[in-house]
Image: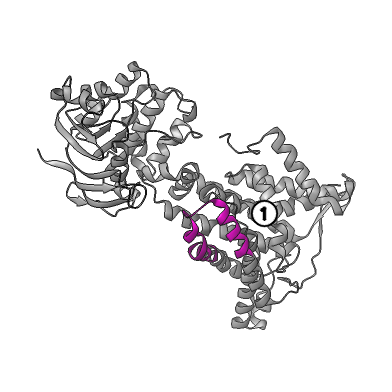
Amino acid sequence: MTALLTVEGLRAGYEPGLDIVTGASLALAAGEVLALLGPNGAGKSTLVKALAGLVPVRAGRIRLDGADLGGLPTHARIACGLAYVPQSENVFATLSIRENLELAGFRLGRALRSRIDAVLSMFPDLVDRPERPAGRLSGGQRQMLAIAMALLGAPRVLMLDEPSAGLSPRLVAVVLARLDQVRAAGTGVLLVEQNVAAALDVADRAMVLVEGRERHVGPARALRGSPLLAELFLGAAA
Amino acid sequence: MLQYVVDGLVLGATIGLGAVGLTLTYAILRFANFTHGELLTVGAYLTHGLLALITGLLGAEAVAALGRIGPLGFGWPLVLALLLAIPLTGLVALLIDALLFARLRGHGAAITLVIASFGAALALRHLVVVAYGPNPDYFSRAIPIALTVVPREILGGARLTPDQMAVLALAAVAVLGLHLLLTRTTIGRAMRAVAESPTLAAVIGIEVRKVVRWTWLIGGGLACLAGVFLGLTVQIRPQMGFDLLLPLFAASILGGIGSPLGAVLGGLLIGLAESLAVPLIGADYRAAVAFAVLILVLLLRPQGLLGRAG
């Protein structure tokens, strides 16, 4: 496996001297879905925020396709091919679907229209009435819009922070099923999820994070039903 | 009566242009910038200083030979001075941000920035007094001759000086240009995104610091234009921006904080309310009427005229 995104010994946290991510390492291949699992407070969201440049990194290396992302501001990381969908406030609520997509693709110039069409073909729910304000969309539609916005720039790596949060089980399946198309396009996906069953259904591999560093990495299929998961989530392994 | 409407529109155009910068900086930097009124003053005085410099370089005779533009009270040297002063005022705004606001951002509450901006406003105003003295001045000593735009038979008629007409026309051009900039250009769209959510803007790849710089440049440039309009239609003096500060805030709140077109509309309404108050209840209460309109609108529509409900 040739790694597209590699993270080595990452330490990151919001406050100086209080690291939430305490030396995490991972490797993600093109077209692979890696689920980041772990109990509350394990540092999953902080890890992806640090990769996006939104949380200060104290130590470690982040490389995307060989390029060192360390020290780059968020917008520069996005320009390098990283995309990040936050858990909440991931769309411009007062703007319409169309305006959200146009803003997210502001750098695409003449290619914008065709990219919007290409991305919307993955999310038919958004095609109807594009003038609807994003703030009035259902939770599932809002997640789809957020993912569509992240995909406009054809990223190399897509990082999703709990896309199933607040969604019904049916919608979770609908949203996560779209990741097959993302994977097929060669994009690597880092999926932070609390919904372990749904994440393992869609992921190729899974990494369990405990206290800010990896406790287990392996094929998603092997982890499904494993006593390790119950042990970790019940806190016995902490 | 119609004369008061026309006078109100001229004042309102100036207030509206000034308020655009205020509403933009509020939307993007999330604080009420009291320095903004002084940017009008700085813009007007920079233009005045550059006009004197151009006159000095070309010689008074050459400037006189260039003459005035048609019936206007000013000539091309003032236009040139204004075109130079607009980016310079934007740079002054950038400099204040770099020296003061950028150092305070992220270190405490928005009130820290507000108080700092109040201090910077005092410092700027007194710097202008030190440099130019406390007395009023004018861009042109030409005596303006008002032209009849509406005959006396219709609601008492209305007269406007050519300079006032130019102010109205240029304000309309500036507002149209701003609208096109915000809706049709990459930087304009990026400014709207940052105003909505700076974090999400960064996540979709926008360089937020660059947007902040452009916001200061555009807000400062428009403040300069508003200051020169005030100088052309009234006079220039060190207090001019400070005196207009409350109407500027009223216009941006009335129009809906964060909405540039709302600020222009709010400015026109505040200008009209102030002007129409004179024949109705007397000049002493004109400022109070503007604020009564503000309170009334906010009671009926808390997000302002063109603001979006949160």
Q: Position of residue A209 (x, y in %)?
A: 23, 35
Q: Position of residue A85 (x, y in %)?
A: 34, 36
Query: Furthest residue to the left?
Result: A1
Image quarter of residue A149:
top left
Q: Is residue B105 magenta?
A: yes
Q: Position of residue B292 (x, y in %)?
A: 78, 43
User: On screen, A14 above or below A215?
Assistant: below
Which quadrant of the rendered structure holds the C terminus of chain A?
top left
User: On screen, B20 above or below A166?
Assistant: below
Residue plotted at (74% across, 54% down): B11
Q: Position of residue B264 (x, y in %)?
A: 65, 47
Query: Furthest residue to the front?
Result: A236
Q: Is residue B307 magenta?
A: no
Residue plotted at (29% across, 19% down): A173
What is the chief secondary structure element of the magenta stretch? helix
* Residue B5 seen in this snapshot: no
| In the foreground, A15 or B74 | A15
Residue at mark 1? B169
Q: What colouring does the structure picture have?
A: one colour
